[in-house]
Image (cartoon, helix red, strand yellow):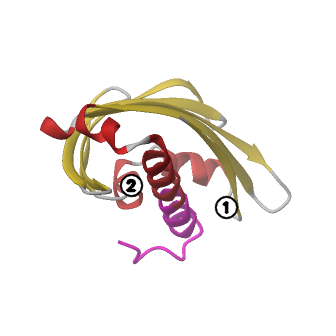
Amino acid sequence: MNIKGEKEMTASREAVWRALNDPEVLRRCIPGCTLLEQVGPNELGATVSLAIGPVKAKFSGTVRLQDLVPPESYRLEGEGQGGIAGFAKGAANVRLVETERGTLLEYQADSAVGGKIAQLGSRLIESTARKLSDQFFTKFVAIVEGAGQNVT
């Protein structure tokens, strides 16, 4: 499944870049994320609890930052295991473009799931993925623009 979009922010490209590389900011933005910590150079360990339709799972996995071109772009690759619920893996290319107002964040992500979750059907999985993506970027914009200092 492919999801792409963009968000414009009034923050500088450098400020957006710093936030995209800050594990605490990312943890606050990722829906259901209870743990996101640096485990190596450009690698984070994550624990995320999600419900997709009737299936609830706690995923543990890793996120790697690759092809870093500060403060312009990078690629995120991640995978997680959710026990009997199955697995999820995906990648996203993120690009920051300076604008008159601040910064345009462009993203394109691909993801795949397997196991019990995959049996739910592509429409439910895709709509959930789009909803989670929108929640992430809405919270991210709020935090970066300063309005989200108390966003949890």
The residue under the point 57% across, 45% down is 17
Residue 82 visible? The answer is: yes
Query: What's the CA distance linking mark 2 and mark 1?
Result: 20 Å
User: Label 2 crowding class (10 Å Cα cut-off): few <14, some 14-19, many 20+?
Assistant: some
Tell me which amino acid carries mark 1. Ala
* Left or right, 72 with reference to 65: right
Tell me which amino acid carries mark 2. Ile
The residue that disc 1 covers is 11
Residue most toward the left? Answer: 84
Q: Quadrant of residue 73?
A: top right
* Left or right, 24 with reference to 54: right
Q: Is residue 146 magenta?
A: yes
Residue in the foreground of this view, choosing between 117 and 99: 117
The residue that disc 2 covers is 30
Look at the image and give the residue range highlighted in magenta: 135-152
Q: Quadrant of residue 70?
A: top right
The residue under the point 32% across, 57% down is 53
Q: Secondary structure at mark 1?
A: loop
In the displayed structure, would residue 137 be above or below residue 85? Answer: below
Mark toward the start of the polypeptide (2 vs 1): 1
Give the image location of residue 136, x and y in percent: 48, 57
In the displayed structure, would residue 113 be above or below residue 18? Answer: above
Give the image location of residue 140, x and y in percent: 51, 60
Q: Secondary structure at mark 2?
A: loop
Residue in the foreground of this view, choosing between 93 and 58: 58
